[in-house]
Image: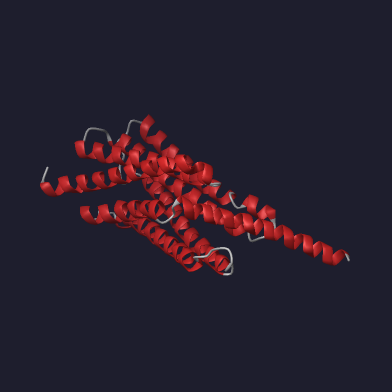
């Protein structure tokens, strides 16, 4: 193996290993401070999924480096990495959606907000399971030209595209809503800047993944090894994970959760005032 090919494997292995250490450290901090965080479960669940994702990704890179397993097993482990990573950010996006729906008086909308997330994840996991069963039970090697393989790639690409749109849409909604709440956050400008930055950056990263996943099914050609590494893994996986660990710290999540509590309390007061005024 040439030094260039060796570097292609070693660079992501080192980066993903570093991320795994950072996530574990953050988990320890969450456990220590959970008594002070009303919504630590949001971060705990998301970080738990990130740990599973990072372990799966490191396993695929190690197996590819050693060239010691069949394409079927690589396909399975890669799908686990894709799906768990997608679900971890689905939880984050749903948390934002839940807060945005706190501005509405209709509680039914808050309850039904999770339905699209459940449907997308069920379709994604279900079709991936079907593909795994087809390749596994038939003992076939995974072919990039296989119609089921291409369909699975297209579904994953579509899911990340929808998630990209979701982060932009609800990022804008949260920005507009929190902008009106001048008394809730002392450092409102900084908080709003973080919402905008996180929304746009994660959305852009997932949009890059969408384009890269479509490249082979459409062109039937492979990208350059380094270009594929950067655009398929480093940008859409490492950057969003770093954003979650560094920008969306437990304190920020707690502040957003506290804002939801304030909104619900204000909503009850307004509803009571409305009823009183209309019964007098």
The residue sitting at 32% across, 46% down in the picture is: 19
Does 253 appear above or below 175?
Answer: above
Counting from the top left corner in percent of width and height, residue 176 is at 55, 68
Between 193 and 158, the one nearer to me in the picture: 193
The residue sitting at 50% across, 53% down in the picture is: 253
Left or right of 262? Residue 252 is left
Does 72 appear above or below 5?
Answer: above
Does 255 appear above or below 127?
Answer: below
Counting from the top left corner in percent of width and height, residue 272 is at 78, 60
The residue sitting at 43% across, 60% down in the picture is: 198
Whether residue 122 is visible: no
Whether residue 179 is visible: yes
Counting from the top left corner in percent of width and height, residue 108 is at 68, 53
Left or right of 200? Residue 231 is left
Taking the view exactly as shown, the residue that stands out farthest to the right is 280
Does 188 appear above or below 31?
Answer: below
Count of marks, rendered view:
0
Q: Residue 17 is drawn in which quadrant?
A: top left
Viewport quadrant of the C terminus:
bottom right
Between 76 and 201, the one nearer to me in the picture: 201
Q: How are the colours assigned in the image?
A: secondary structure
Viewport quadrant of the N terminus:
top left
Left or right of 227? Residue 131 is right
Left or right of 211? Residue 191 is right
Counting from the top left corner in percent of width and height, residue 210 is at 38, 56
Taking the view exactly as shown, the residue that stands out farthest to the left is 2
Between 212 and 265, the one nearer to me in the picture: 265
């Amino acid at each position: 193996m040439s030094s260039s090919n060796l570097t292609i494997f070693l660079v992501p292995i080192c980066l993903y290993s570093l991320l795994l250490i950072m996530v574990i450290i953050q988990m320890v901090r969450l456990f220590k401070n959970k008594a002070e965080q009303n919504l630590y479960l949001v971060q705990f669940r998301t970080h738990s999924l990130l740990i599973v994702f990072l372990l799966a990704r490191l396993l695929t890179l190690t197996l590819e480096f050693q060239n010691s397993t069949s394409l079927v097993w690589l396909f399975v482990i890669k799908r686990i990495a894709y799906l768990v990573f997608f679900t971890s950010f689905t939880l984050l996006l749903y948390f934002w959606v839940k807060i945005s729906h706190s501005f509405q008086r209709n509680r039914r909308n808050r309850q039904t907000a999770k339905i699209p997330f459940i449907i997308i994840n069920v379709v994604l996991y279900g079709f991936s399971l079907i593909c795994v069963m087809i390749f596994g039970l038939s003992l076939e090697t995974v072919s990039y030209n296989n119609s089921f393989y291409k369909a699975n790639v297209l579904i994953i690409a579509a899911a990340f595209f929808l998630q990209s749109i979701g982060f932009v849409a609800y990022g804008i909604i949260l920005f507009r809503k929190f902008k009106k709440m001048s008394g809730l956050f002392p450092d409102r400008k900084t908080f709003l800047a973080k919402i905008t930055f996180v929304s746009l950056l994660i959305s852009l990263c997932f949009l890059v993944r969408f384009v890269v996943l479509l490249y082979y099914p459409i062109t039937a050609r492979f990208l350059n090894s380094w270009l594929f590494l950067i655009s398929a893994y480093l940008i859409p996986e490492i950057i969003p994970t770093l954003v979650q660990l560094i920008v969306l710290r437990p304190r920020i999540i707690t502040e957003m959760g506290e804002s939801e509590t304030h909104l619900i309390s204000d909503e009850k007061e307004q509803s009571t005032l409305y009823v009183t005024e209309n019964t007098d």
